[in-house]
Image (cartoon, grey):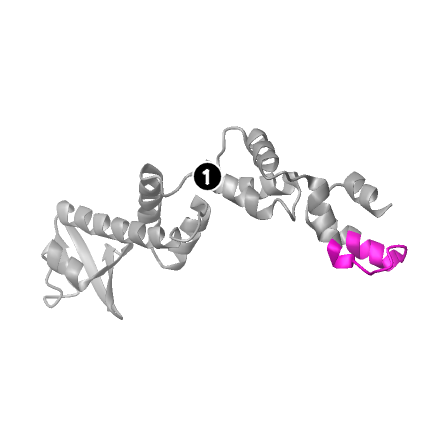
Amino acid sequence: MSLLSIKKKDKAFSVYEYGDYLGFIYKSDLDKIGLDKSEADDIEVDDETIDKVKDIVKYHAFDKAVTYLKDFDRSAEDIKLKLRMKKYPDYAIEEAVKLLYEYNYLNDERFAESYIRAYMDQKSKSLILKELSMKHVKVSYPDELIDRVYAEEDMTEDKAIARLMRRFEGRDMTDEKVRRRAASLLIRHGFSFEQINNHLT
C-alpha cells in the first residue's frame, strides 16, 4: 500500500506518492481510477492504483507532445524541454517520448533533414551538424545525409555565404570596419576563415 496525496491546483490535481511528485491529473481521471477527492487529501491506495495514475500522467504527456508536432518536426530534446516546462515528471516525459518514436511522431532522420533544409542557406555544414548533435539527434550517417540534402536542393556553402553577404550590398567592402562586421557575421554562422577570406578578398 502507498499513501497518495492529492492537491487541487486550478482545474487539475497534483498527485504525490509519499511526497514524490507523480504529475497532475483531472477530476475525470480521478473518477476513472475510482478515487473520491472529497474524502481526504491523503488516501491510502494499492500499487495498482499508483500504476493507473502514472499511466494517465504518461498519456497526458504524450497527448501534449503530439500537439507540439502538429505543424513541424521537433527533436526529442525540444519535446522534453517543453514538457518539463509544463510540469510533467521525468518518468512521464521519457515514456511519452518512447511512444512518440514508436508511433513515428518522432523520427531523428526526418527531423535532421528538415533542420538541414531550414538552415542550409544561412549556416555552414559543420555548424548545422554541431547543432543537431547538441540537440541529441541521432542519425546513422550525418555527413552523407547533409551532402544528399545539399545536392537535392542544389545548395553549396558558397551560395549560403553569398546570401548572407547580401546584407552588405551597397557597402564599401574596402572599409575595414565593414569587412570586420562581415567576417564576424560569417564566423557566427560557422564558416571557416579560409571560406571567409575567399569571399572578402
Q: Which residue is mark 1?
A: 110
Image position of 140 (left or right of 67): right
Report x, y in % for residue 54: 23, 49
**Residue flagged by tag 1: what amino acid is it?**
Arg
Q: Nearer the viewer, residue 195 or 4?
A: 195
Image position of 159 (left or right of 42): right
Q: Is residue 25 above or below residue 148?
A: below
Report x, y in % for residue 1: 13, 48
Residue at 84% x, 47% y: name it.
200
Res. 113 visible in picture: yes
Asked if residue 169 is among those painted magenta in the image, a careful observer would answer yes
Secondary element at tag 1: helix
Res. 135 visible in picture: no
Q: Nearer the viewer, residue 38 or 190?
A: 190
Asked if residue 102 is among those painted magenta in the image, a careful observer would answer no
Image position of 33 (left or right of 64): left
Q: Is residue 112 above or below residue 182?
A: above
Q: Which residues are magenta?
A: 166-182
Residue at 37% x, 59% y: name it.
86
Image position of 7 (left or right of 70): left
- Which corner quadrant of the image does residue 20 belong to? bottom left
Residue at 31% x, 43% y: name it.
95
Report x, y in % for residue 199: 81, 45
Q: Nearer the viewer, residue 74 or 122?
A: 122
Say few, some or many: other residues with alpha carbon within 10 Å of mark 1 (under 14 / 14 to 19 / 20 or more). Answer: some
Q: Quadrant of the C terminus?
A: top right
Report x, y in % for residue 29: 17, 58
Q: Nearer the viewer, residue 27 or 191?
A: 191
